[in-house]
Image (cartoon, grey):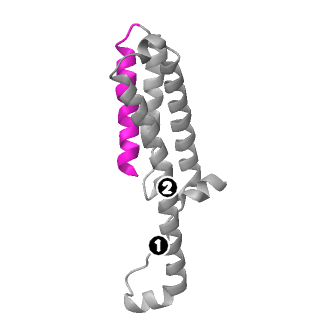
Amino acid sequence: MVKDENEKLRSMHDLLQSMNGSDLFDKSQVVTLEQRLEQVERIRFNQKTMFNTHLVEEYDFASNSLISEIISLVESNSAFIQTKELQPLIDNIKEADQRVNYYRSNYDSVAQKFNVFLEKNKIYLKDLDQSSTPEKRPLFQMASEN
């Protein structure tokens, strides 16, 4: 999941650099998109911060809207879309984004089972190791349900 998220962000960065190096796009618009990408990278969540469903929602909204905007801008420019190096970047962004959603669903399935196991067996786990307090895992479905 992290690998695909990184690939998606890297491909967006590479695509924006190509757009910036082209005379086919408004430079100020591309710079604004690059700044938004930097902001998306700054608000990216990790395993500890994903308990904050608002952070996950904010990241998803910012990331999805940026992807949509970049791809629609590129695909609306027929001269630019003809460039053979760029189509793989667009495909990488779309495919990585789809895989992230698939992995999130799988993660939620496993994490839910883990959380149920912890809840059912917390007394036994405490007996096994007094110093350990296993924590439940956050779920992505929580972010999408709020």
Residue 5, given in percent of the width and then of the height, sits at: 41, 44
Residues 66 and 4: in front is 4
Q: Tell which tag, 2 or 1, sits nearer the viewer.
A: 2
Q: Are marks 2 and 1 in contact (CB under 8 Å)?
A: no
Span highlighted in magenta in the image: 1-23
Q: Which residue is mark 1?
A: 135
Name which residue type carries label 2.
Arg
For label 2, the SS is: helix
Taking the magenta stretch, the answer to whether it contains residue 39 is no
Dot 2 or dot 1: first in sequence order is 2
Name which residue type carries label 1.
Glu
For label 1, the SS is: loop
Residue 33, given in percent of the width and then of the height, sits at: 47, 24
Instruction: Give the spatial CA distance, label 2 vs label 1.
Output: 19 Å
Q: Which residue is mark 2?
A: 104
Where residue 141 sits, quadrant-wise, is bottom right
Residues 15 and 118: in front is 15
